[in-house]
Image: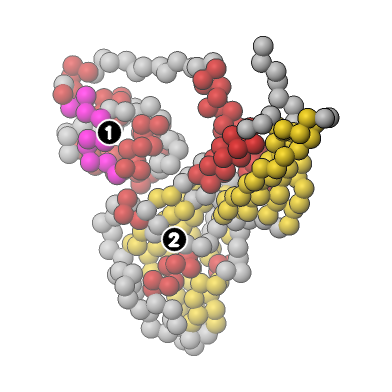
Amino acid sequence: MINEPIFEVKEEKKEGNYARFVISPLEQGYGHTLGNSLRRVLLTSLPGAVIVSVKIQGVKHQFTTLKGVKEDVVEFLLNLKKVRFKTTSEKPTKASISVSGPGDVKASDIKTDAEITVANPDLFLASLSKGTKLEAKLEIEVGTGYLPSEERITEEIGLIPLDASFSPIVRVNYRIEETRVGRLTNYDKLILEVWSDGTIDPKEALLTSAKILVGYFNQLVSPKKIEKKEESKKDELGAIGKLSVEEIGLPTRVANALVKAGYESVEDLVNAKRDELVKVRNLGEKSVKIIEAALGEKGLLLK
């Protein structure tokens, strides 16, 4: 017979975007089990919104300078990567900067839609001299984990893709101490420290991470059957339909997102509706266009 675990979770300290949690008493060994699992999920699986591409007026590539701007383009882009956003939508969002000097450009100068707000408005971006005007168009996306700029295909002149670190959690530490239950001293006390970027409360982040883990464990206990799609078009597509999404030249990020959503082959893509693909996590309108281009090379179309 398996005993249900009973322990307490206390938010021992809260300062701004930092919180320290104490989880105890835990059976010996479960401090590390919970601590390591929660740390990994906190750092890799929570969604966040960041700038993924920039187009600066008068700039064709990042290795250049702008007249009247103290920072070169690379420094400006590095500062933009630090901007964090709170959003109520998972769709890609457009934003812009239009500022005239003299003075400093800050994250608060970014103009966004009503659904998205800048979480760190005081962040410095650039310094302009008198008579200088800085204009830029930004694209913001919601995602998880890390997406290198090399995986963002673009043929638009002047559009600069950025490395995107979506995670709203900046840092996580945990340590284990011994604690007593009655006369027994071989219990674990898990002390978990969480630093966020200000777009999510540390306690909310902890609870969300726990729910993600519960979802995975529930699939082990009560597995849901994966519904296989009808194979009506299998013969029509022939060998092309059997190709995996990794074999048709899609970026790794796009292919991984498709596989996680159950679209593993060309046949799956052809039978899918375009509107369904746009809603797939970590995809979007631009990614679907990439998919359409890849299928087009094989003489196929989305629904």
Task: Identify the mark nearer the N-term, 1 or 2.
Answer: 2
**In the image, residue 248 above or below residue 98:** above
When asked about the image quadrant of residue 255, the answer is top left
The amino acid type, in three-letter code, at marker 1 is Val
User: Label 1 crowding class (10 Å Cα cut-off): few <14, some 14-19, many 20+?
Assistant: many
Left or right: 117, with 283 as reference point: right
Q: What residue sits right under mark 2 in the picture?
A: 138
User: Label 2 crowding class (10 Å Cα cut-off): few <14, some 14-19, many 20+?
Assistant: many
The magenta stretch is 240-251
Q: What residue sits right under mark 1 in the picture?
A: 245
Q: Residue at x 34, y 41 (%)?
A: 254
Instruction: Kindly state the secondary structure of the residue where label 2 is placed.
Output: strand
Residue 245 highlighted magenta (yes or no): yes
Instruction: Kindly state the secondary structure of the residue where label 1 is placed.
Output: helix
* Front position in the image: 281 or 279: 281
Q: Position of residue 61 (x, y in %)?
A: 30, 69
The quadrant the N terminus occupies is top right
Q: Which mark is residue 200?
A: none
Q: Residue at x 76, y 51 (%)?
A: 13
Left or right: 102, with 52 as reference point: right
